[in-house]
């Protein structure tokens, strides 16, 4: 009996140790801290999940405790259900530097009941953004948790939804196109009100009679090189995120990527001739 108990305890300890070492789903407070309105963020399930609240008083936000230089970050998010027009849930990486900002953005733009959410992505490299793309999701992201991830490698940045790549930004420094390369970035998320622009360009206003609005997060996962941290980490070609998944999309991933671009893409700055009579150079530089 005592032996069984001891063994059982050992198994639990080993399991905990293993999950921490492998970087698999962690608790919120292990890697993150609240940055805006702690009254509006509640930990659930022993910190394995959180609830974010937006009401007329405030939105809220959180950030990673560390910055990273290359890696992969993912979390599962269940977005505000029902009439979410005017709400924006953002999940992004940011170098937190003013003039030469690097930033990789996911922004989830709410909608009127029953109408599809829009996911906007953007890439800032060396202070220059204005690279918006928008896709409509192929499922209702407020019904269930779905995984959103940013993979940041030397060769490209890949934004994925449930492991389907929805955007690839290739490193084309060789032909003079900036790429986020030398500044570490933190991981951030916010839930806020942006009814001046978010839904149909600001036409659809937030309906405060539906407040408070809630979004849920779980399965936080950051696998990257913390800065400050081991000096050789960011340049180590053996880091798994520098491997095949980053270098080329597998045929299956490439197929899904094409499917998203053909069937779900609703805006691409590359084809917006009003804004860019001549498309920016990265638009024709391939993925
Ligand atoms: C909301 O739904 C409308 C109608 O389906 C769609 O045109 C729009 O792109 C959707 N998203 C936003 C953020 O307005």
Image (cartoon, rainbow, N blue to C red):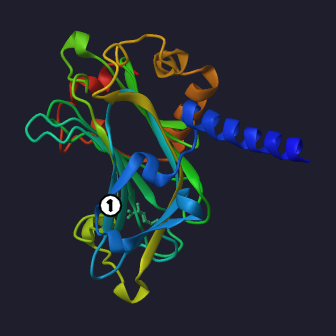
**Figure check: 131 above or below 226:** below
Label 1: few (<14), some or many (≥20) within 10 Å?
A: many
The residue closer to the viewer here, 223 or 150, is: 223
Question: In the visual, does 65 lie left or right of 148?
Answer: left
Tell which residue pokes out farthest to the left in this image: 99
Identity of the residue drawn at 14% across and 39% down: 97
Q: Quadrant of ligand 1?
A: bottom left
The residue closer to the viewer here, 169 or 274, is: 169
Residue at the spot of label 1 = 61
Identity of the residue drawn at 16% across and 30% down: 126
Residue 43 rendering spot, x and y as whole percentages: 49, 65
Residue 280 rendering spot, x and y as whole percentages: 21, 29
Residue 69 rendering spot, x and y as whole percentages: 32, 27
Whether residue 187 is visible: yes
Tell which residue pokes out farthest to the bottom in this image: 209
Identity of the residue drawn at 54% across and 15% down: 244
Question: In the visual, does 37 lie left or right of 52?
Answer: left
| Quadrant of image for the C terminus | top left
**Figure check: 272 above or below 137:** above
The residue closer to the viewer here, 144 or 185, is: 185
The residue closer to the viewer here, 136 or 225, is: 225
Question: In the visual, does 124 lie left or right of 7?
Answer: left
Give the quarter of the image for residue 49. Answer: bottom right
Give the quarter of the image for residue 271. Answer: top left
Identity of the residue drawn at 19% across and 45% down: 274
């Amino acid at each position: 009996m005592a032996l069984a108990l001891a063994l059982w305890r050992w198994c639990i300890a080993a399991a905990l140790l293993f999950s921490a070492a492998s970087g698999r789903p962690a608790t919120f407070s292990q890697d993150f801290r609240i940055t805006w309105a702690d009254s509006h963020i509640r930990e659930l399930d022993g910190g394995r999940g959180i609830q974010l609240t937006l009401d007329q008083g405030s939105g809220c936000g959180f950030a990673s405790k560390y910055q990273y230089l290359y890696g992969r970050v993912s979390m599962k998010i269940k977005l505000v259900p029902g009439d979410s027009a005017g709400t924006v849930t953002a999940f992004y990486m940011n170098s937190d530097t003013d003039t030469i900002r690097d930033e990789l953005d996911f922004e989830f733009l709410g909608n009127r009941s029953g109408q599809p959410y829009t996911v906007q992505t953007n890439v800032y490299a060396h202070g220059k953004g204005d690279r918006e793309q928008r896709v409509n999701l192929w499922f209702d992201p407020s019904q269930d948790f779905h995984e959103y991830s940013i993979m940041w490698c030397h060769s490209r940045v890949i934004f994925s939804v449930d492991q389907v790549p929805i955007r690839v930004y290739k490193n084309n420094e060789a032909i003079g196109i900036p790429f986020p390369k030398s500044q570490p970035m933190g991981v951030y998320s916010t839930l806020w009100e942006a009814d001046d622009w978010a839904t149909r360009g600001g036409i659809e206003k937030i309906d405060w009679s539906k407040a408070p609005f809630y979004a849920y997060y779980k399965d936080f996962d950051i696998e990257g090189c913390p800065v400050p941290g081991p000096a050789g980490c960011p340049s180590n070609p053996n880091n798994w995120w520098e491997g095949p998944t980053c270098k080329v999309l597998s045929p299956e991933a490439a197929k899904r990527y094409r499917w998203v671009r053909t069937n779900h893409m609703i805006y691409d700055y590359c084809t917006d001739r009003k804004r860019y009579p001549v498309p920016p150079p990265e638009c024709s530089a391939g993925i």
